[in-house]
Every structure is written in C-alpha cells, then in structure tokens.
Amino acid sequence: MRILIIGLTSFFMTFTSFSKEIVVEMLNKRDDGQKMVFSEDVVKVDVGDTIKWVATNKGHNVEFIAGPDGASLPPKSGLNKDVSMTFEKAGVYLYICTPHKVMGMIGLVIVGNDTSNKDAIAGTKMIGRGKKKLASMIGSI
C-alpha cells in the first residue's frame, strides 16, 4: 500500500511539474502595427497548462464565447483585470475583448492539438473585423 501511495504521489507531482503558464497581453497596439489586439492571436497549449492574460493596456478584458462540448467556460473578466485559466479539456476555444470585439480583438486557444471542434468555432457569430479575423485564424489551423 505504501508503494502505491508513493507511486501515485510521484505521478501527480510529475504531471503538475510539466504544466506551463503562458502569458498573453491585452494591448492597444502590437509591434506589427495591429491595434486593439492580444499579443498572440492563436495560442497552443497542452491539457493542464495555464494562460494568464495581462491587462498591459487599460480598457480590455477577456470573455470566452465558445469552446469544446462539455468545457466549462469562465465568467467574463473585469476591465483592466489580469485573469488566468487552466485548460483541462482539449479542443479549440474562442475568446474576445468585449469592448473591442467589433475591432477584431479576438483570440483562439488550441488545447492538446485537438481541432475537432474548429468548424463549430468557425460558425460562431462575429461582427465587424472579428468576422474576417476569425475566418483567417481558423484557416491557419
């Protein structure tokens, strides 16, 4: 029994030690000249990894609007607030900056290289520049 407990403890400690935290900034302008953007349009992570969105510039938030079936989507973050999410379910997630979605401030997270729900994400109703940007991002995965 002692060996089983030690083995399970080692397994879970090893699993969590491989988890990463990725930082995505909320920006008014990116180095490539794009305005009202996240620092990365598409972020690829493994199951168990965490993304931390940092409100580098004021007036932004993070709101998840779509994800894989059965995934628990967090509530919309407050303006100017950093927020983190650990991804436990593989698939594609779509998030926006609520005040700037019409300007195309959207992003995708691909968890575990699973893009099986990308068609459902592509069908998400978007407005303004977000519509064209989503189509472009989906086409790139």
Image (cartoon, grey):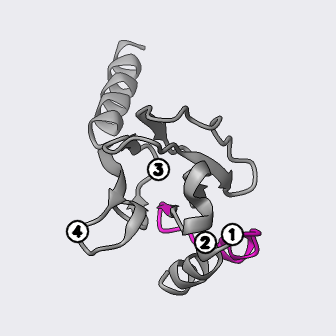
What is the C-alpha distance between the residues marked 4 and 2?
20 Å
Which residue shows up at 54% across the image and 43% down it?
88
Q: Residues within 10 Å of mark 4 (few under 14, many from 20)?
A: few
Residue 90 seen in the figure: no
How far apart are the alpha carbons under marks 2 and 1? 13 Å
Residue under numbered circle 4:
31
Residue placed under numbered mark 2 in the picture? 130
- Disc 4, disc 3: CB below 8 Å? no
On the image, numbered disc 1 is attached to which residue?
121
The residues tagged by marks 1 and 4 sit, at their Cα atoms, a distance apart of 27 Å
In the image, the segment drawn in magenta is 108-126
Front disc: 4 or 3: 4
Mark 3 and mark 1: span between their CA atoms?
19 Å
Q: Residues within 10 Å of mark 1 (few under 14, many from 20)?
A: many
Q: Identify which residue is drawn at 34% across, 19% down.
A: 3
Asked if one can make out residue 36 in the rendered structure from this viewpoint, the answer is yes
Q: Nearer the viewer, mark 2 or mark 1?
A: 2
Of mark 1 and mark 4, the one earlier in the sequence is: 4
Where disc 1 sits, the SS reads helix
N-term mark: 3 or 2: 3
Check whether the beta carbons of the residues at disc 4 and disc 2 lie within 8 A of each other: no
Three-letter amino acid code of the residue under disc 1: Ile
Q: Amino acid at mark 2?
A: Gly
Placement of 12 over or under 125, stated as above or below: above
Residue at screen point 60% across, 46% down: 63
Q: Dot 3 corresponds to which residue? A: 47
Q: Would you say residue 124 sits in the magenta stretch?
A: yes
Give the mark toward the camera: 3 or 2.
2
Q: Label 3's element?
A: loop
Amino acid type, label 3 = Val
